[in-house]
Amino acid sequence: MAEILNLIPSFRRIAMGAGLFLVLAAPSLREVLEQDMTRHMLIQLPFLVLAGWLLIPAAAASCRFVVIWDRFGIAGILTANLAAAYWMLPRSLDNAIALPVFEIAKFISLPLLVGVPLGCCWPRMPMLGKGFVMANVVSMLGIAGWLYLAAPVRVCVFYLSDQQEAVGRLLLCLAGAISLAVLFCAFVGFRPSAARTA
């Protein structure tokens, strides 16, 4: 994914990121996405992160500043991980729907605290660090999916139990798909940059 985004010219990336953010912030689409828990967690939130990633060229000066004090990208990735984990909590989803201040915080924090740090710091992380981050992402998705399925009651006030179970299953499937992709890349040795130069 990162390799593909790096092929897009900077001005187009900024335009795509800004356009995606404005589309997601449109009241009509925002309401449609937030009516269903699956669309809220697995469409709106990831696309807000993608919007931040696309806007990295607009924050180039900030990225250069980050490189100076975060040489291996660990602090940036940790920030992104903590911010993403917060928005996976059921209480956070409820607050984003019930309170405008949390909705605004979601639209600011996901692009700036998840998308931008991921894009700036991921290429500079050592391979061991990337493996640790991927293992953490898989475990976080798996635990969240299991909790949504195992919870005896609704954990989100604004979503029904069947929506909660659907999200739980999809999170477990996503964790499994990421695990398989990582194992495939590890054993086959596929690297996008190597594939292009071959």
Image: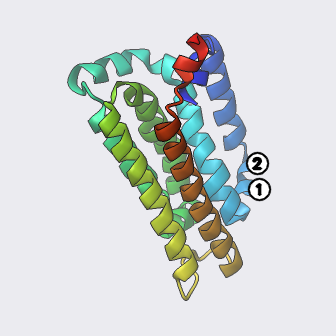
Name the residue: 24% across, 24% down. 71
Q: How many marks?
A: 2
Q: Is residue 53 visible?
A: yes
Disc ID at residue 174: none
Question: Could you say which is closer to the camera, residue 70 or residue 83?
Answer: 70
Residue 35 placed where, x, y %? 72, 63
The amino acid type, in three-letter code, at marker 2 is: Leu
The C terminus: image quadrant: top right
Kind of element beneath mark 2: helix
The amino acid type, in three-letter code, at marker 1 is: Val
Q: Quadrant of residue 160?
A: bottom right
Residue 88 placed where, x, y %? 49, 60
CB under 8 Å between discs 1 and 2: yes
| Residue of label 2 | 29
Q: Is residue 100 visible?
A: no
Q: How packed is label 2: few (under 14 Cα within 10 Å), some, or many (20 or more)?
A: few
Q: For the view shown, which residue lies furthest in the left direction?
A: 69
Name the residue: 57% across, 77% down. 149
Kind of element beneath mark 1: helix
Q: In whole angstroms, how far apart are the C-alphas of marks 1 and 2?
A: 5 Å
The N terminus: image quadrant: top right
Residue 169 placed where, x, y %? 63, 68
| Residue of label 1 | 32
Name the residue: 34% across, 46% down. 132
Residue 73 placed where, x, y %? 31, 31
Q: For the view shown, which residue lies furthest in the front direction?
A: 188
